[in-house]
């Protein structure tokens, strides 16, 4: 059984690091971040090639948001 500890922990969910604790420790899954960055870059490239106004551009914009 674990001992009872009266301490609070602060978490910050960020863009560069998945989780930053109050103590300054950083954590996260680098592999998933790289995949998300690649997916986002591809969506941005696709968005810039779309013509303003049509529904397909709106659908692509939702992926980027």
Image (tube, rainbow, N blue to C red):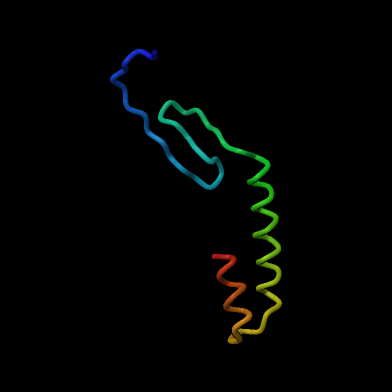
Q: Position of residue 27 (x, y in %)?
A: 55, 33
Where 31 sits versus 62, above or below?
above
Q: In the orientation shown, which residue stands out farthest toward the front? A: 1
Q: Position of residue 45 (x, y in %)?
A: 70, 68
Q: Position of residue 36 (x, y in %)?
A: 64, 53
Left or right, 42 with respect to 10, comes to right
Left or right, 11 with respect to 41, comes to left
Where 11 sits versus 51, above or below?
above
- Residue visible at 58% across and 65% down? 64
| Labels in figure, total | 0
Q: In the orientation shown, which residue stands out farthest toward the bottom? A: 53
- Residue visible at 32% across and 17% down? 5
Q: Quadrant of the N terminus?
A: top left
Question: Hey, which quadrant is residue 53 in on the image?
Answer: bottom right
- Residue visible at 70% across and 71% down? 46
Where 60 sits versus 2, above or below?
below
Where 31 sits versus 41, above or below?
above
Left or right, 48 with respect to 23, comes to right
Left or right, 64 with respect to 6, comes to right
């Amino acid at each position: 059984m674990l001992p009872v500890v009266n301490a609070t922990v602060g978490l910050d969910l960020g863009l560069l690091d998945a989780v930053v604790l109050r103590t300054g420790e950083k954590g996260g899954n680098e592999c998933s971040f790289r995949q998300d960055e690649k997916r986002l870059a591809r969506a941005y490239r696709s968005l810039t090639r779309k013509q303003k106004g049509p529904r397909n551009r709106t659908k692509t914009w939702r992926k980027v948001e």
